[in-house]
Amino acid sequence: MQLFYLPDLVLSDPKLPAAEWQHAQKSLRLRPGDPFWATDGKGHLAACRLGEMPPPNKKNRGEPPACPVTVDSVTFRPRPEAGLHLAVAVTKNPERMDWLVEKAVELGLAAFTPLVTKRTEKATVKLERLQNLAVSAMKQSQQVWLPEISGPLDFDKWLSSAPTGDGFIAHCLPENGPFLGHCFSARRSATVLIGPEGDFTPEEVAGALEAGYRAVGLGENRLRTETAALYAAALFAASRNG
């Protein structure tokens, strides 16, 4: 099943975004009247038909406008009972964070927040790009819930709010706690904090523990930031399917 992203799916006059219908036309060779499946990323899955292809918009540098669609039926899939929120220190190389978001969403990530820690080397984040990658990964993995992508957020400010579900902080300091894979509860959401390449500072770890997070480890191997975060996402997904 090829899935498309239709944000205004449940509105009275839904339109397929230009990038989506261009893909439908050029890559899949769909034509007006052809059926396709779409989601709004809010739990809805719809059987649709493509409308007439609109001409390029001359007032907008020739870019095509959104394409009308006909929605034949809509079903709703409830959000999973438990979800994972990853809060991860911004990586120096933005491509690593791009990769992380794409793969974590494929595993069923519920939310993602880039963090700016004391040892973060580069705090710049292209949030729109991460959101677009999340949409692409949601469609590829045929899910109907789009993760919330927000931030970047200062680590101290992040700790001012309670974690979603069970809170964990993975770090490399001595006595970092039990293995994360043994800590997830089958029916509870979780928030996992992952630090930068130089790890969280002792003060940041102490602050997280005071805020209600539990220190955990990710095994004997020293992992890069994006690898550690994806490993956490995989462990959470496994705990849901075990």
Image: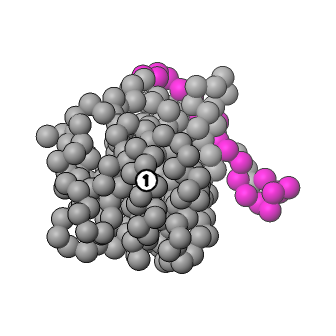
x 55%, y 65%: residue: 116
Which of the 4 image quadrants contains residue 206? Answer: bottom left
Q: Is residue 60 magenta?
A: yes
x 19%, y 54%: residue: 178
Q: Image quadrant for the C terminus?
A: top left
- Residue 238 seen in render: no
Q: Could you say which is closer to the camera, residue 37 or residue 114?
A: 114
Q: Could you say which is closer to the camera, residue 174 or residue 133?
A: 174
x 43%, y 53%: residue: 208
User: Looking at the picture, how far across and down is residue 105, in whole percent?
Assistant: 39, 51
Q: Image quadrant for the N terminus?
A: top left
Position of 166 relative to 102 (above/below): above
Left or right: where does residue 71 sit relative to residue 102?
right
User: Looking at the picture, how far across and down is residue 46, in whole percent?
Assistant: 46, 29
Residue that label 1 marks: 208
User: Looking at the picture, how far across and down is residue 186, in whole percent?
Assistant: 22, 34
Which of the 4 image quadrants contains residue 19? Answer: bottom right
Q: Is residue 228 magenta?
A: no
Left or right: where does residue 207 sit relative to residue 173?
right
Q: Could you say which is closer to the camera, residue 117 or residue 37?
A: 117
x 30%, y 55%: residue: 215
Q: Residues within 10 Å of mark 1 (few under 14, many from 20)?
A: many
Outermost residue to the right: 59
The amino acid type found where label 1 is placed reads Ala
- Residue 163 seen in render: yes
For mark 1, give the secondary structure: helix
User: Looking at the picture, how far across and down is residue 192, in whole percent?
Assistant: 37, 51
What is the span of residues highlighted in magenta in the rendered image? Answer: 57-75
Outermost residue to the left: 242
